[in-house]
């Protein structure tokens, strides 16, 4: 079973709309990360949010973390076609073992 | 710019063949990782390393060996390749566990 899981397999929006990808995780964590993978590329980190943070922003991206419900969300505002990608949440629990475990990903399609 | 370079980009081998996937990072990162990515399974950790000469077993290590010869170079070895190892392989590096990962562009392996 996954340590972290996104809650939707796929989402589709039109350009300019906002969208939120949700993630739930199963253990105490030190931090949670969001990654994006575009077609033919490796994943690229978007945001790292630590357990003592409730919100983190990076341009049009906003991540939230709720440790009481063990959930996180990644919101994208004013979506663009180039936001089309697979979005993953990932966490390594509370240790520093280096074992970052990824969710299965949510495929986001942004249509013109 | 920090980079992780994988080679080859594509590889075809026969069942029982011997394959080596290469990864080099110029990030001066301590940690390096090998993941495989398959539809329905997401990214799964095969092996990882804390530094030159160190090797840690990941979550799906069977059929794979790895070697970290220098801080920069991490190799994944398939000594008796099987069709079940057909996959997209990613190498990544990070400063430490639970920090942001830098991924390579991937190696697509087909075992026939």
Image (tube, rainbow, N blue to C red):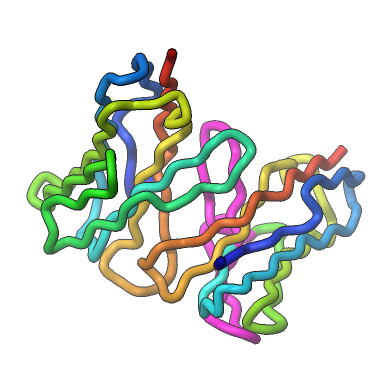
Q: Is residue A35 visible?
A: yes
The percent coordinates of residue A96 (x first, y second) are 35, 74
What residue is at 52 percent from the left and 74 percent from the top?
A: B31
Residue displayed at 40% across by 63% down:
B100
Q: Position of residue A97 (x, y in %)?
A: 40, 73
Quarter of the image where one finds residue A2? top left
Q: Residue B59 in magenta?
A: yes
Is residue A79 one of those drawn in magenta? no
Q: Is any atom of residue A1 visible in this view?
A: no
Magenta residues span B34-61
Quarter of the rendering containing residue A92: bottom left
Q: Nearer the viewer, residue B38 or A11?
A: A11
Q: Is residue B30 left or right of residue A77?
A: right
Name the residue rendered at 47%, 30% in the picture. Answer: A82
* Left or right: where B55 falls relative to B59: right
Percent x, y of residue B12: 87, 43
Examine the rendered structure and indicate whether residue A8 appears above or below residue A95: above
Q: Is residue A14 left or right of residue B107?
A: left
Please say if B64 is above or below A106.
below
């Amino acid at each position: 079973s996954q340590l972290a899981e996104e809650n939707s397999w796929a989402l589709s929006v039109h350009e300019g709309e906002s969208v939120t990808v949700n993630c739930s995780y199963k253990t105490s964590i030190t931090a949670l990360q969001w990654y994006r993978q575009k077609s033919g590329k490796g994943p690229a980190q978007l945001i790292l949010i630590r357990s003592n943070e409730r919100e983190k922003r990076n341009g049009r991206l906003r991540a939230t973390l709720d440790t009481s419900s063990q959930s996180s969300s990644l919101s994208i505002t004013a979506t663009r076609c180039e936001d089309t990608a697979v979005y993953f949440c990932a966490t390594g629990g509370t240790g520093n073992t280096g074992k970052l475990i990824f969710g299965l990903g949510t495929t986001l399609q942004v249509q013109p | 710019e920090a980079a992780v370079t994988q080679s080859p980009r594509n590889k075809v081998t026969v069942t029982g063949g011997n394959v080596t996937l290469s990864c080099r990072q110029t990030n001066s990162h301590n940690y390096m990782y090998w993941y495989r990515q398959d539809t329905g399974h997401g990214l799964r950790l095969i092996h990882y390393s804390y530094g030159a000469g160190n090797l840690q077993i990941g979550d799906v290590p069977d059929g794979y060996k790895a070697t970290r010869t220098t801080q920069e170079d991490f190799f994944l070895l398939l000594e008796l390749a099987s069709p079940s190892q057909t996959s997209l392989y990613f190498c990544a590096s990070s400063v430490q566990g639970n920090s942001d990962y830098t991924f390579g562009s991937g190696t697509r392996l087909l075992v026939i």
